[in-house]
Amino acid sequence: MKKPVSAAFFPLILSGALLFSACPNNTNSDLEEKTILYEAPVDDLGGQYQFYTNDWRRYNSYTSSRLLSRPAGTNTDIFEIAASKLSGHEKAGYGLIFAASVDGANGELSYYRLVITTEAVYQVEKRVFNPAAVNEEDKYTSTYFCGSSDTKGRISYFLLQGEDQRQKDAFNRIKVKREYIKTSEPEDPETGKTTYTYRFHIFFNDQHADSFTDTGAIPVRKDDSTDPGTWDGNRMAFTTGVNNAAVGEDFPNNPVDVRYKLVWN
């Protein structure tokens, strides 16, 4: 039995599937293994982006699209997409990267990740790049909101779920609205660290579902560009989790197939 691997992909590979890890199971080896990484919209998908894989080498991972280009003049404090999961395990998350910021010399990101499942469970994780890390495991530090670091999350009945969510026209709209609270001046003159406090409001299908406050939020960093949509802290991306054979993925027989749409405000 082959052992699954965690390959480094670009678009960005994000650590950990939503739940567990395990070896691949026995599958029909005659089926073609393939992966589609958020291909640009084409006519037959109606303006959708697609993530698709039935390759066991994608087990136990999150993969995201490239950071999406935000049209000029849109509200940089609102991050919104529409997503529909047509196949794949019901406990594997999919959704939105938001408030992303390039924090490392090699393009490493700090970001928030909001994922939902077809069981109507959702969770928010903040992942902050640690430049002092000496190994891959310590490369990011995580803080969880609206759930915990294990299998627990929260349920929202504003979300379409089950077979209602597995129809081609059944999209869940996922939106986060960022609200500035305050900036704290540096308390340590040596580090010069400034902290930012934001409150984030979560909406599912235009219904306010939850909110959380982060007193050490990822800041918005202005650059030389006149377009705030390109500034660090204002960027977003799609993200898709793939579980493994132990918790129901069945590659190559049953693929993970998730469709996404952009929503700008």
Image (cartoon, grey):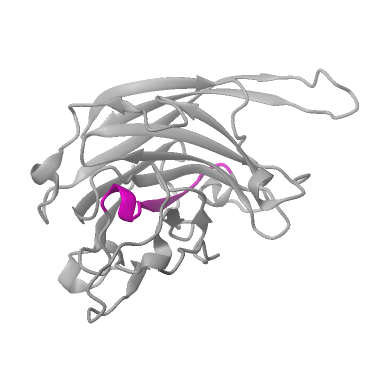
Image point 28% across, 65% down: which residue? Answer: 251
Position of residue 91 measured from the top left corner of the image (x, y, whole percent): 28, 42
- Report the front residue among 118 and 68: 118
Q: Quadrant of the N terminus?
A: bottom left
**Magenta range:** 233-248
Residue 71 visible in rendering: no
Indicate yes or no whether the magenta region holds residue 243: yes
The mark total stands at 0
Which part of the image, by quadrant, shows the C terminus?
Answer: top left
Residue 141, magenta (yes or no): no
Q: Residue 203 sits in which quadrant?
A: top left
Q: Give the quadrant of residue 176.
A: top left
Residue 147 visible at all: yes
Instruction: Please provide percent x and percent y for residue 157.
Output: 18, 26
- Relative to 134, is 155 on the left or the right? left
Q: Identify the residue at the far right of this view.
A: 190
Which residue is located at x 18 percent, y 47 percent? 171
Q: Is residue 64 left or right of residue 227?
A: left
Image vertical order of residue 225 relative to residue 251, above or below:
above
Q: Is residue 140 above or below residue 242?
A: above
Q: Is residue 46 left or right of residue 13?
A: left
Residue at point 34% right, 45% down?
Answer: 95
Place residue 214 in its image quadrant: top right
Please state if 100 lies on the left or on the right of 212 as rendered.
right
* Residue at the far front in the pictured view: 1
Residue visible at 60% across and 20% down in the picture: 215
Q: Picture coordinates of residue 208 (x, y %)?
A: 27, 23
